[in-house]
Image: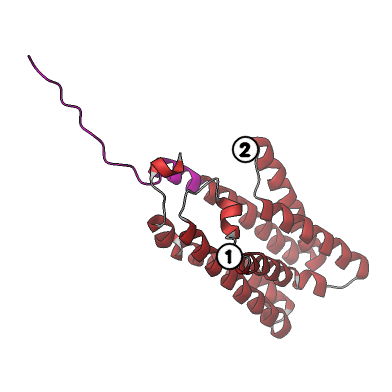
Amino acid sequence: MKTTKTEEKPPEIGSVSDMTNSTKSMRLVSFFSEILPLASFFVFYRLYGLYAAAIAGVSMSAFMLLYFWLVERRVAKFVVFSTLFSGVLTLTAIMASEKILIKIQPTISSVVMAGVLLGGLMRGKAMMQVFFGTQFPLTEATWFQLSFRWGMFFLVAAIGNELAWRYLTEANWVIFRTFVMPPATGIFMLAQLPLTLRGRLPLEQDE
């Protein structure tokens, strides 16, 4: 009589396939929600000036929000906040004829995000987990480290934008916003990948 041997699979770590799909989805959303508005901003600036560029950037962001809501039935909260905030400041800038309100938008957005992340840590809460907890099953310690790192990054980004618009020409500031900060953000995001992979939860803890 033959006995069939059932091989026991080792415990899976963090549902790798789910993690990969979530990462791909997040990258797709991040790419289109960030790159297309910036591309519109740059093109319209070259053609029509700063006010038209700001309107184009906000309009593209709103369009991408609507598109992803219709396709995936979910959008990131911070993207909604950023789009609404940019829209209000852009409208105010046009009505008041103050270009500075457009230039300080990245500064204010970065300061707000840094305040949310670092302020959350001071209250014992990892806000990155609030934003991305449903997509990435990570340990508490990992969420706290990511919240701290991204909080510090946004602080540096705010300082960088302040220095750029104050000491560069308007055209060079547009280049800084379009071609310097997005690659810097992407590089920083990739630098967090080892920490994210190390901090994945075992599958049984995720369920």
Say which quarter of the image contains residue 105. Answer: bottom right
Residue of label 2: 72
Q: Using the rendered image of the protein, determine whether residue 30 is visible from the camera's viewpoint.
A: no
Q: Is residue 85 left or right of residue 136?
A: right
Residue of label 1: 182
Identify the residue at horizontal 47%, vertical 48% (top origin): 137
Q: Is residue 206 magenta?
A: no
Q: Position of residue 22 (x, y in %)?
A: 50, 45
Quadrant in the picture for the C terminus: top left
User: Callout 2: few (<14), some (14-19), or many (20+) C-alpha neighbours within 10 Å?
Assistant: few
Q: Position of residue 204 (x, y in %)?
A: 39, 41
Quadrant in the picture for the N terminus: top left
Amino acid beneath label 2: Glu
User: Callout 1: few (<14), some (14-19), or many (20+) C-alpha neighbours within 10 Å?
Assistant: some
**In the rendered image of this protein, does residue 176 appear above or below residue 27?**
below
**In the rendered image of this protein, does residue 43 appear above or below residue 133?**
below
- Mark 2 or mark 1: whose residue is earlier in sequence: 2
> Which is more toward the observer, 205 or 78?
205
The outermost residue toward the bottom is: 167
Secondary structure category for the residue under label 1: helix
- From the image, state whether disc 2 or disc 1 is nearer to you: 2
Q: Using the rendered image of the protein, determine whether residue 95 is visible from the camera's viewpoint.
A: yes
Span shown in magenta? 1-24
Give the CA distance from mark 2 to mark 1. 24 Å
**In the rendered image of this protein, does residue 118 appear above or below residue 133?**
below
- Magenta: main secondary structure: loop
Amino acid beneath label 1: Pro
> Which is more toward the observer, 9 or 113?
9
